[in-house]
Image (cartoon, rainbow, N blue to C red):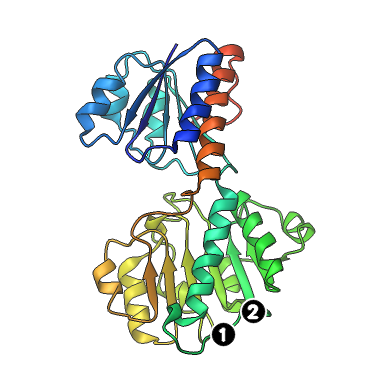
Amino acid sequence: MKVLVATEKPFASTAVNGIRKEIEGAGHELVLLEKYTDVQQLLDAVKDADAMIVRSDKVTPAVLDAAKQLKIVVRAGAGYDSIDTAYAKTKGVVVENTPGQNSNAVAELVFGLLVYAVRNFFNGKSGTELMGKKLGILAFGNVGRNVARVAKGFGMDVYAYDAFCPANVIEEAGVHSVADQVELFKTCDVISLHIPATPETKGSINYALVNQMKKGGILLNTARKEVINEPELLKLLSDRDDLKFVTDIKPDADAEFCKFEGRYFSTPKKMGAQTAEANNNAGIAAAKQINAFFKDGCTKFQVNK
């Protein structure tokens, strides 16, 4: 079987070596398409691929139509909104992700950004500490659990809400469960977002919700850009000069947000999974899942059933 690794942002070389070892060790052929600059390059490369590994690359209907032999696509990471999963299903293509492989990397970034924010973006002026502050985690999946783990090391009081995670599971992790996201925003000094971008969540982080936060609140987004209602958050930051917004996904309205100097920061590119360890973990996990699919028909991590 031919396995295509198509990455506009390439894996680290150690990850590529690990992927190659897994794929070729199982008797399959590995083909690399790295740093491509035109979608036509991807369309050409996928024509005779039986499987594909991607990172944040867009797998559109056009890509799926071009892939006449494609049987499985694995997103090396947790989020898969860059893949048209519904269309893939109509084409008989299995789509999988690799949950948990990037979670520690994202959790560590959360606290890098958070320390930067509470210390006034290192502008030399006195800031505050995290110990004793209330941290609210919106979505208690793999990343949320790791954020909670690190937060306890900072001495933070941790709360969480997840519509799909039972309250007792959250409580058993040593985290306070709340009834809904409004209560989470009302209760906490810091809110860390870890929700996926779905029809229900897109634009859901809006004026009314974030305005529930107490004075001096910090909103931190390492999830997806689409969950933020940018026009409403811009209005709220204008109306309330005590709030801060920190993100590793540059908003479409970045230039407007930059006007709130000292209260806004975005990394130039999405940084959550940008560590050597996360690269290796996610890439090799994707390769192993493809091998399991071809060997045993395993679809344990399928997201388009």
Q: Which residue is mark 2?
A: 133
Residue 35 lies in what quarter of the image?
top left
Rendered location of residue 214, percent (x, y): 54, 84
Q: Are marks 1 and 2 in contact (CB under 8 Å)?
A: yes
Residue 156, above or below 66: below
Rendered location of residue 48, percent (x, y): 32, 13
Picture disc at residue 128: 1
Q: Residue at x 55, y 46 (%)?
A: 102
Q: Left or right: 3 with respect to 277?
A: left
Q: Residue at x 41, y 15 (%)?
A: 50
Residue type for callout 1: Thr
Q: Left or right: 91 with respect to 157?
A: left
Q: Residue at x 40, y 86 (%)?
A: 240
Let me know if residue 193 appears in the view. Answer: no
Mark 1 and mark 2: Cα distance apart in space: 10 Å
Residue 15, above or below 293: below
